[in-house]
Amino acid sequence: MANAESLVTGAGQADGRPFSYRCTYNSRNGQAYAVSVSPEGGNRGGDMGRGGRDVDFGGNRPVAGGDPRKAAAQACYDAVLDYAQRRNPTASNFKIFLSQNRYGQQSQIDIQVTGQGELRQMDRLRVQWNYSCTYNARNGRVRDISMSR
């Protein structure tokens, strides 16, 4: 990765469940960012373009009695960040601007989250992008992630 940044990946176990992780580490300031954690053996590595299938990202379950938009925002944040990192493997400093999130009710159980993010390319140029993600409030799964510049 660029300059003092390194891509760090690994595997671990918490509460008896295996997981894998990925982050970008900056050795100049000692900070990690663009962190993603997924259940081991989960379906995170496949293409999530416009497949229309639900993908289980683990831990993204509906919040009983809670605001489904919050659950949708968190689930989509994790999924979109992972998707952006896989589509731009040489970029770094991925950000999603949560204040830009917009919500649309697709059906009684589907919530669409749209918003904006930013990444830094190897030449340090910052690129902003738009995303869309659909969250199923019944099963806590994400599908139909798209990203455009």
Image: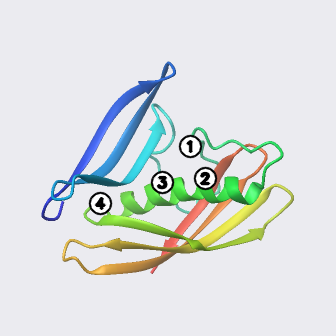
Question: Callout 1: 10 Å neighbours few (<14), some, many (20+)?
Answer: many
Residue 57: numbered disc: 1
**Nearer mark to the viewer, of 2 and 1:** 2
User: N-terminal of the two: label 3 or label 4?
Assistant: 3
Q: How many marks?
A: 4
Residue 142 in view of the camera: yes
- Mark-to-mark CA distance, 2 and 3: 17 Å
Which amino acid is tagged 4?
A: Pro
Label disc, if present, on residue 47 of the rendered structure: 3
Mark 2 or mark 3: whose residue is earlier in sequence = 3
Give the label, 1 or 3, closer to the camera: 1
Residue 29: percent from left, percent from top: 20, 58
Q: Are there few (<14), some (14-19), or many (20+) residues within 10 Å of tag 4? A: few
Q: Quadrant of the N terminus?
A: bottom left
Q: Give the residue type that dot 1 points to.
A: Phe
**At x 42% / y 67%, what residue is drawn?**
95
The residue beneath circle 2 is: 75
